[in-house]
Image (cartoon, rainbow, N blue to C red):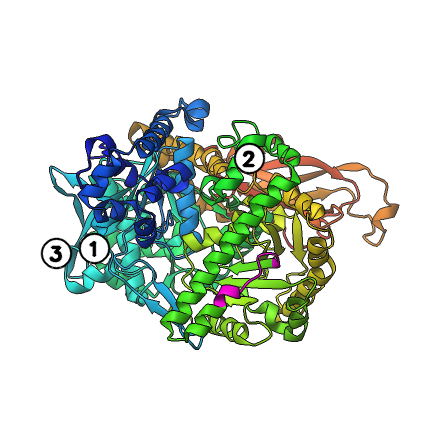
């Protein structure tokens, strides 16, 4: 089932028969020659099919296909593409070369959405695009990864904007036979799995998507064996109510694990991409309990093989369900595991709200967790500090791996041709090599500007066509439709804003001062224009009001043709926008943008970022590669709004517009900044670097730990689980019973500047009860001013003397001016070489009275 080559069912002439294999492998979507090959077959039909090669092959008649099979020019291009395709599939990879001895690694990546290409519309926005780009880079790098998701019969929704600026949501039933997917077959029949829901079973058909070397498996509830309501469970992405949401997440998590088993795939790394998929841990837990493992051992085994990525920086954004709803939908599971019901609920229980929180479930069942930018990692550590007792937020075991984008997908072909001419030949394979990107400096300014201006012309043409279609559909006059042909000036400074229309992203921020905006846009010498695009969730009425507001402004006489709102934002439109604008605007409320990736796509194409220092831009901005919108990140949203608005206009007026216009026909200083943007951002914010980070920081250590935990009949898992249980049961006995601080007599009023830098010895006596002292770490904690902030310092204390009646003495040297209480504390925490991180047990005994 797993190793067969996927093909489109339609029979093609022998000379071009491998087009059916190429059409169903999404490798075509990030290879320009393959895309052009399909476009050449019939440019009109290619556009009409939404760039879907499977549907294109079905729509072309036999006579056309036969003619192509005898067309010498087409056959030459066909053979070149097939040769490249074969070389890709059979060629060496980064993983083979660097980790060839880790053939046992198998990663399962679970995500509620995947955004690969416009021909497979099972994505809504950034989370899905990230998952698709992750899968593409995993293929490019040779990472042994399979994906698990849902196959949405109606996708997300198609957006239309009516004559009043209202968003109209339209759903379509997609014909799976004409999408770049294929059913998984077993003995000639579609492979299915079954999951239990209250009062009935639901049958799920398994489909597969070939993404280069790897496969993504998608679950489909639209099966004849199911009731009508159950068939609709996978009808729409993020549709329905809470009942639909919890049922979909059960299908994804529990159904996904069952699907992998039916396929004979047994991963040793399960990557939960956002909390939607966290129910997968319960299905794995159930299997281990059926094997006879005690509950606490089963939990440790699951945790040893699980990685969790959180994408949401605000508590309200995490999926929660009432305990009653959970008990209803997981009723069959709880009936099967009745003696463990409360322990299972406790894995996801939010004690503050009394709700079952999917992120809590993922946090409690994942050995390694991470946010998606450095700032988001900090925010997440603060948000989940309570999970780990009395420790500094900096020590909370949530790391960060900053998002990236798939360079081959998002970089314009004309840019890639330019890079091929001037960068070393390995830049595509070694994208994270910063040194080779310095060669961008030698690309002639004329060549860069020519490429950029052509992409800008393409964007303007695309935008005009989109606007004409809007007006035509809304019944406007031919005169109004023809006016659009003169909208948007290809020579004007063009600023793009396109993303999901959530209110915190503040799509309308630039409209806070329409008088000032009017002056900028209508300056005859230095005009500025704005292109907006994006969808709001059908249930997000405030987000839809943002669309209506932008549309209303775009209709004002002074802004018409210079501020435009495009409809039906998708991957295809995104390519035009991130490749064709001059500036990419991003102004979320800080710190609510976990990462953001649209600006990364723009940066790959020489587009300059103009953004609040939030998400990835907080670490990507270096002062010379774009512009930062000033923000203190204050929680006073009104103050932040005012501050950001003033900063946007000031930087536009004083920096961006003058730099773009004040240099004659060829803006060398602007191009210089484009070069610095590409040089500094491309090697860092791509998914090759990101997936390499995931591999080396999470996948490999998790795979090794998972193997260790299950070896010898779960010997280490049992040892760790029993150890944790023993420590939890006896930790209350651990006490710090004595501290000898020989400088305690020093006055704390003496200024630090007058104290000579000396050291002193501090000693402490710890009572451990039945706990072995070697199973703990004893540390001194204090804070030091590093010039920017107070940084926590941790000094290990070493045992001294003998253990007498469960009491052990410890000592360490610290700066002589520190006094216990006002300046430093002592803490004790449990340790184990088998822990995934220092605070796997959230137990700390401390003299933390001074904080």
Residue closest to the eye, 681 or 643: 681
Residue closest to the eye, 415 or 711: 415
In the rendered image, is residue 550 in sight? yes
Q: Position of residue 646 (x, y in %)?
A: 69, 67
In the rendered image, is residue 769 in sight? no
Q: Name the residue that disc number 2 marks.
A: 419
Gap between marks 1 and 3 measured at Cα: 9 Å
In the rendered image, residue 491 lying in the magenta stretch gets the answer yes
Q: How many numbered circles are shown?
A: 3
- In the visual, does 649 lie left or right of 304? right
Furthest toward the right, the residue is: 754
Q: Name the residue that disc number 1 marks.
A: 221
Q: Which residues are magenta?
A: 484-493
On residue 389, which mark appears?
A: none
Residue closest to the eye, 97 or 173: 173
On residue 224, which mark appears?
A: 3
In the rendered image, residue 4 lying in the magenta stretch gets the answer no
């Amino acid at each position: 089932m797993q190793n067969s080559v996927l093909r489109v069912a339609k029979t093609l002439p022998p000379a071009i028969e491998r087009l059916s294999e190429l059409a169903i492998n999404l490798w075509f979507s990030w290879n320009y020659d393959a895309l052009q090959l399909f476009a050449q077959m019939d440019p009109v039909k290619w556009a009409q099919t939404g760039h879907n090669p499977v549907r294109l092959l079905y729509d072309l008649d036999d006579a056309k296909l036969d003619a192509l099979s005898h067309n010498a020019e087409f056959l030459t291009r066909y053979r070149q593409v097939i040769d490249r395709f074969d070389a890709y599939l059979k060629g060496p990879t980064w993983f083979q070369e660097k980790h060839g001895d880790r053939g046992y690694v198998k990663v399962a990546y679970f995500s509620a959405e995947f955004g690969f290409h416009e021909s497979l519309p099972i994505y809504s926005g950034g989370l899905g695009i990230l998952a698709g780009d992750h899968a593409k880079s995993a293929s490019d790098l040779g990472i042994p990864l399979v994906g698990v998701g849902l196959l949405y019969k109606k996708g997300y929704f198609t957006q239309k904007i009516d004559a009043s600026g209202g968003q109209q949501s339209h759903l379509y039933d997609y014909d799976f036979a004409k999408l770049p997917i294929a059913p998984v077959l077993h003995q000639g029949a579609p492979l299915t799995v079954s999951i239990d829901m209250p009062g009935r079973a639901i049958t799920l058909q398994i489909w597969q998507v070939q993404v280069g070397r790897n496969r993504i498996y998608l679950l489909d509830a639209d099966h004849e064996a199911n009731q009508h309501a159950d068939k609709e469970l996978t009808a729409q992405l993020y549709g329905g109510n809470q009942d639909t949401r919890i049922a979909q997440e059960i299908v994804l998590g529990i159904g996904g694990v069952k699907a992998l088993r039916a396929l004979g795939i047994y991963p040793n790394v399960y990557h939960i991409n956002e909390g939607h998929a966290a129910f997968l841990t319960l299905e794995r837990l159930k299997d281990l309990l059926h094997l006879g493992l005690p509950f606490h051992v089963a939990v440790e085994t699951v945790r040893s093989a699980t990685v969790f990525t959180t994408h949401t920086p605000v508590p309200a954004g995490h999926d929660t369900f009432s305990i009653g709803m959970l008990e209803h939908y997981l009723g069959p599971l709880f009936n099967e595991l009745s003696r463990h019901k409360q322990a299972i609920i406790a894995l996801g229980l939010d004690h503050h709200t009394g709700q079952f929180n999917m992120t809590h479930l993922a946090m409690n069942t994942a050995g390694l967790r991470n946010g998606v930018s450095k700032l988001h990692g900090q925010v997440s550590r603060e948000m989940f500090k309570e999970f780990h007792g009395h420790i500094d937020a900096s020590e909370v075991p949530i790391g960060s791996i900053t998002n990236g984008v798939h360079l081959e997908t998002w970089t314009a072909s004309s840019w890639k041709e330019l890079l091929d001419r001037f960068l070393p030949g390995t830049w595509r394979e070694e994208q994270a090599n910063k040194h080779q990107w310095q060669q961008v400096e030698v690309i002639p300014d004329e060549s860069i500007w020519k490429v950029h201006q052509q992409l800008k012309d393409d964007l303007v043409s695309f935008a005009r066509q989109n606007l004409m279609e809007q007006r035509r559909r809304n019944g406007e006059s031919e005169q109004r439709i023809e006016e659009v042909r003169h909208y948007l000036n290809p020579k004007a400074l063009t600023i793009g804003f396109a993303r999901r229309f959530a209110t915190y992203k503040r799509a309308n921020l630039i409209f806070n001062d329409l008088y000032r905006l009017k002056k900028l846009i209508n300056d005859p010498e230095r005009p500025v224009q704005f292109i907006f695009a994006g969808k709001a969730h059908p249930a997000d009425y405030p987000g839809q009001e943002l669309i209506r507001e932008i549309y209303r402004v775009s209709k004002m006489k002074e802004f018409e043709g210079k501020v435009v709102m495009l409809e039906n934002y998708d991957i295809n439109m995104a390519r035009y926008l991130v490749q064709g604008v001059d500036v990419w605007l991003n102004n979320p409320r800080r710190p609510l943008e976990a990462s953001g990736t649209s600006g990364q796509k723009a940066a790959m194409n020489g587009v300059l970022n103009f953004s609040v220092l939030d998400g990835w831009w907080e670490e990507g901005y270096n002062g010379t590669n774009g512009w930062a919108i000033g923000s203190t990140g204050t929680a006073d949203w009104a103050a932040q709004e005012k501050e950001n608005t003033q900063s946007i206009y000031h930087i536009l007026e004083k920096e961006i517009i003058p730099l773009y216009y004040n240099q004659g026909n060829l803006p060398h200083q602007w191009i210089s900044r484009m070069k610095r943007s590409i040089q500094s951002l491309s090697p860092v914010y791509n998914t090759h670097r990101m997936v390499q980070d995931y591999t080396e920081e999470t996948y490999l250590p998790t795979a090794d730990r998972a193997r260790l935990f299950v070896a010898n009949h779960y010997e280490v898992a049992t040892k760790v689980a029993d150890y944790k249980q023993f420590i939890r049961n006896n930790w209350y006995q651990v006490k710090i019973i004595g501290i000898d601080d020989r400088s305690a007599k020093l006055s704390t009023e003496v200024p630090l500047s007058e104290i000579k830098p000396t050291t002193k010895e501090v000693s402490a006596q710890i009572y451990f009860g039945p706990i072995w002292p070697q199973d703990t770490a004893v540390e001194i904690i204090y804070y030091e001013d590093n010039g920017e902030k107070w940084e926590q310092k941790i000094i290990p204390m070493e045992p001294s003397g003998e253990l007498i009646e469960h009491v052990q003495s410890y000592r360490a040297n610290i700066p002589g001016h520190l006094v216990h209480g006002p300046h430093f504390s002592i803490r004790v925490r449990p340790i184990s070489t088998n822990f995934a991180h220092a605070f796997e047990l959230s137990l700390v005994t401390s003299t933390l009275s001074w904080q």
